[in-house]
Amino acid sequence: MSAHLFTSVITGGAGFLGSHLADRLLTERHKVIAIDNLITGNVANIQHLAGNKDFKFICQDVTEYIFLPDPVNFVWHFASPASPIDYLELPIPTLKVGALGTHNSLGLAKNKGAAFLLASTSECYGDPLVHPQNEDYWGNVNPIGPRGVYDEAKRFAEAITMAYHRYHQVNTKIVRIFNTYGPRMRLKDGRVVPAFIGQALSGEPLTIFGDGSQTRSFCYVTDLIDGIYRLMMSDYHQPVNIGNPAEMTIQQFAEEIIRLTKTSSTMEFHPLPVDDPKVRQPDISRAKKILAWEPQIAFEKGIQTTIDFFQQRVS
């Protein structure tokens, strides 16, 4: 008898979230096939899995047809640039992976009779007029603004996922991911957690956009992956928010990083980017009710682990 029970395909498997998902699935006795074109992913994230007979890596762009001879039980579609720096530099690849990549990944799931999970985003809510955001809110998105390439790619991905569910009866799930942090984030990916930690550890000023009053809610990566795993194993097909509802302002977050890194860094204020959301906080009532999930890792513990990870990378 084979050691593994299931076969899972992760698109974006060498990314921050994809690599943590691979770790979780291997502990759940899945054989994991990670697909990534390394446009923003990094083989360093999956280096520790080299030589694991239940892990296979394929370097491929999922906007091209995905051919796999293996039987597949689950398809986890995580491929996409996900930080503002990346999708502003790579607007067309971002749109293509949201459209063609999702189409190909859904086609794979349909062809294999596999369950499919779309990694969607809280950015579907845009700059929200409803706070906190629940899954019934349709969002306030500027489709032609610079951030629209990411927001609309994910909104289209949700639409085609539901179309495959309704028209082809594919067993689909949609997770809307809120701000997540932890080891394996890229130091210069433009997101606030690595940006602040990197600046603090280098003794540079922490760059705050706007007046620092905009809010974010930070979820530790293993908590997020646990919620996503529970969603895939559920029989629920509507979108589910996964994130930590503990909200803080960007200025409060900067003060925490300065305190925990014991840096002499100051704060430096810059103009707010176009269409930057003023508030971001998940309503996780649905996840609590349907998945019996809520975050477990305290902010101070999670952020300290993340600081320790970056400490080794900042000389």
Image (cartoon, rainbow, N blue to C red):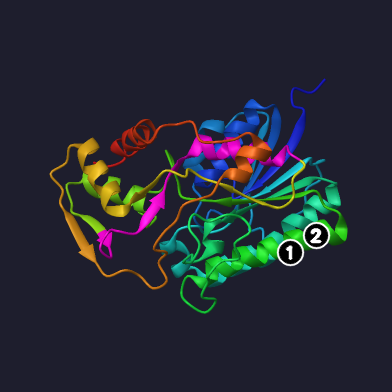
Is residue 217 rendered to the left or right of residue 287? left
- Image x and y of residue 242, in percent: 56, 45
> What residue sits 52% from the left and 79% below the top?
144
- Would residue 219 be counted in the magenta stretch? yes
- Would residue 62 be counted in the magenta stretch? no
Query: Would you say residue 65 is visible in this rendering?
Result: no
**Residue lying farthest to the left in this orientation:** 264
> What residue sits 46% from the left and 74% below the top?
146
| Quadrant for the C terminus in the image | top left
Query: Would you say residue 309 is visible in this rendering?
Result: yes
Cβ–Cβ below 8 Å for labels 1 and 2? yes
Give the Cα distance between marks 1 and 2.
6 Å
| Quadrant for the N terminus in the image | top right
**Residue lying farthest to the bottom in this orientation:** 144
- Image x and y of residue 221, in percent: 49, 39
Task: Tell me, for residue 164, which label it has, or none.
Answer: 2
96 or 173: which is nearer to us?
Answer: 173
- Image x and y of residue 286, in percent: 63, 45
Amino acid bearing label 2? Tyr
Region in magenta: 208-234
Q: In the figure, 120 relative to 87: above or below?
A: above
> What residue sits 33% from the left and 39% below the top?
310
Question: Which element is circle 1 on?
Answer: helix
> What residue sits 18% from the left and 37% below the top?
262
Is residue 65 rendered to the left or right of residue 250? right
Residue holding disc 1? 160
Question: Which element is circle 2 on?
Answer: helix
State the image quarter where residue 272 is shown.
bottom left
